[in-house]
Every structure is written in C-alpha cells, then in structure tokens.
Amino acid sequence: MFRTSNVTLDNQTVCIKQFPSCTCSFFLFQRRNELCKHILIVNICLGVSSENFIIRQISYTEEELSGLLKSVLDQSHLQKLKRETVSTILHCPYKAYLVLYARSTGRRASCQGCRSTLEYDVPIIEIEGRYKCGTNSFRHKFRYCGKYACFKSIPRNSDIKSLPAVIYVQRSITDQEYSRIEKDGLKLERL
C-alpha cells in the first residue's frame, strides 16, 4: 500500500495488487474502466514509463505485478518525481499541432500567450480542449503563434491543466517553417 501526500493528490491510499484500488472518490464512484491519477502516479514512481501499456491497465497478471513491485523491494528505484513531470504526464490528454492558420468566417483568433491577432497562412500551434464558461463547457481550439515564449502559458477558461511536451507537425508545413520554429526551442515531431 502507498500513501500519496502531495497538495495536488489529496492524501489518498493506493493499493497495488491484481486489481489496483484507491480511496479517492473518482475511483470509488466515477470510473469506467480507467485508473485514477493516484494509481497512475504510484505506477510512475514504481518506474513504469508513460508510454508503457501497463500504466493504464485496470488489472495485472502475476508476472506484471511482480515486475511492478520488484522495484519497491529493491528500494533503489523508488524516487520522488518533480511535480511538473507528474502533472505533464497525467493531466495532458491533449495533443498540440503545428498547422497553417486558414481563413474562416468571423473574427480572427488571437494568440493565447501574447494576445496578438494571428495572421492567415502562417504556422500556428493549435490545441483542441474544452472552453469553460460558468457551468457550461464546449469544444474549442486554443491557438498560439509559433513562439516558445507564448506556448508556455496555459489557456484561460479551459480544462487544460498543462501543455503537451511535443507538438505534432502537419504535412502542409514546409521544411523552412519547421526549422524556423524548431530553432525557437519547441519540440516538434512530424506526423
């Protein structure tokens, strides 16, 4: 059994066994074939990579379970993670895309970071999330100009808690635009 003691983790008790469990309200009442953030954090602390399929499994075989708990027995692999790393892995279900900003009806969008109006046919970073307004929320594309300084700010009135570490580049972006934006410090990956 593990105890999560962090401001963002609400002091919950996690039990890693064949069917992992947690004392949080999400795990007890709201889950539908998914794990809560507390179990995911314990898995990460046990050394499971965020890309590993085991991290989101709702049950483990004996072999997988012994592999997970082996690091606890060694005590050498168990380490404290930075709060930023955990929040980036757990709270970022959104993907960012580098796209050409196309002409559309209505007002031109503005950058979420610097608030400048975005130009047409110029590469921008786009994240699709949920815009919150009072008790309502709806799907919305949050847009950033292609500058690293702007992309560091989380959109206001959104459900996005942290920004993705990688920006996926659409095929319409030229190599020249790709290298210009990559030089600015953003981590890009071609689709």
Image (spheres, rainbow, N blue to C red):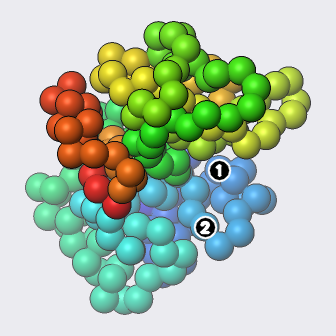
The answer to whether residue 186 is above or below residue 134 is below
Q: Nearer the viewer, mark 1 or mark 2?
A: 2
Classify 10 Å Cα crowding around label 2: few (below 14), some (14-19), many (20 and above).
Answer: few
Quadrant of residue 50 in the image?
A: bottom left
Q: Is residue 18 left or right of residue 105?
A: left
Question: Are circles 1 and 2 on residues that touch, CB within 8 Å?
Answer: no
What numbered label is drawn on residue 97? Answer: none
Residue receiving disc 1 = 24
Q: Amino acid at mark 2?
A: Glu
Judged from this view, the residue extending furthest toward the right is 135
The answer for how far apart the CA atoms under marks 1 and 2 are is 13 Å
Which quadrant of the rendered structure holds the C terminus? bottom left
The answer to whether residue 174 is above or below residue 185 is below
Residue receiving disc 2 = 34
Residue 142 position in % (x across, y down): 58, 32
Local secondary structure at mark 2: loop
Instruction: Name which residue lies at 47% across and 16% down.
Output: 113
Which residue is at the front of the view, 129 or 8? 129
Quadrant of residue 160 in the image?
A: top right
Q: Amino acid at mark 1?
A: Cys
Residue 9 position in % (x across, y down): 52, 38
